[in-house]
Amino acid sequence: MEFLSEINYDKLIEKSLKNVVIEALRIAEEQGLPGENHFYITFRTDYPGVQISEYLSQQYPEEMTIVIQHQYSNLEVHNHSFSIDLSFGGILQTLVIPFASISYFADPHAKFGLSFHVDNLLLKDKGEREADFAEEIQEEEEKQAASGPATVVSIDAFRKKK
């Protein structure tokens, strides 16, 4: 465990708020979206670990917003990301979106929204970071498996905008 010289409360708050998004996605994964709830999720397409088709990547080289409402399938929430099948121009595509890449989450029906800081240092040299990111995920999952089931999902790549 790394010892800190100070507690970054902005980072802790943002981490907690990111868990609100994760839990909302888990509800949708387990039972579908209740009532009129629906999600708008904006994420950085150039963030390490984001997996979208080349077509979508060319159309949205930096940022993309998806709507999770009526027409989605295979929503799976993982430790550090979620995957979902959505239709674009009539073609079903699977997207993998790391939680750390999310810059905005909203549920318009609930009049609820959250903005997040995405670490710009990770956006540079995406190709070089892909292998590192996959290795970091694997190491974290191995640590969690060794320590037993996790009850809280950890997201460490955030700092509140100043």
Image (spheres, rainbow, N blue to C red):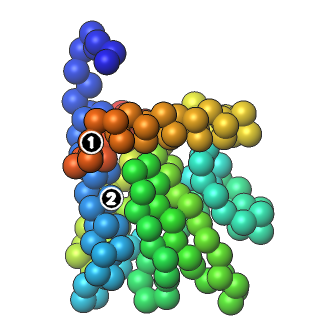
Identify the residue at horizontal 52%, vertical 34% (top origin): 136
Front residue (pair 103, 19): 19
In the rendered view, tell whether residue 98 sits above or below residue 147.
below
Identify the residue at horizontal 22%, vertical 21% (top origin): 7
Q: Position of residue 13 (x, y in %)?
A: 23, 40
Q: Which mark is residue 49?
A: none
Image-quadrant location for residue 77: bottom left
In the rendered view, tell whether residue 135 sits above or below residue 41.
above
Q: What amino acid is found at the position of numbered circle 1 in the picture?
A: Gly
Q: Which mark is residue 22?
A: 2
In the rendered view, tell whether residue 18 sits above or below residue 88.
above
Left or right, 117 with respect to 52, comes to: left
Q: Position of residue 132 (x, y in %)?
A: 62, 33
Q: Quadrant of the C terminus?
A: top left
Mark 1 highlights which residue?
148
Q: CA distance from mark 2 to mark 1?
A: 20 Å
Q: Secondary structure at mark 2?
A: helix
Which of the two labelled residues, at mark 2 and mark 1, occupies the earlier sequence position? 2
Say few, some or many: other residues with alpha carbon within 10 Å of mark 2 (under 14 / 14 to 19 / 20 or more).
many
Front residue (pair 120, 73): 73
Identify the residue at horizontal 38%, vertical 34% (top origin): 143
Left or right, 111 with respect to 122, comes to: left
Q: Quadrant of the N terminus?
A: top left
Image-quadrant location for residue 92: bottom right
Number of marks drawn: 2
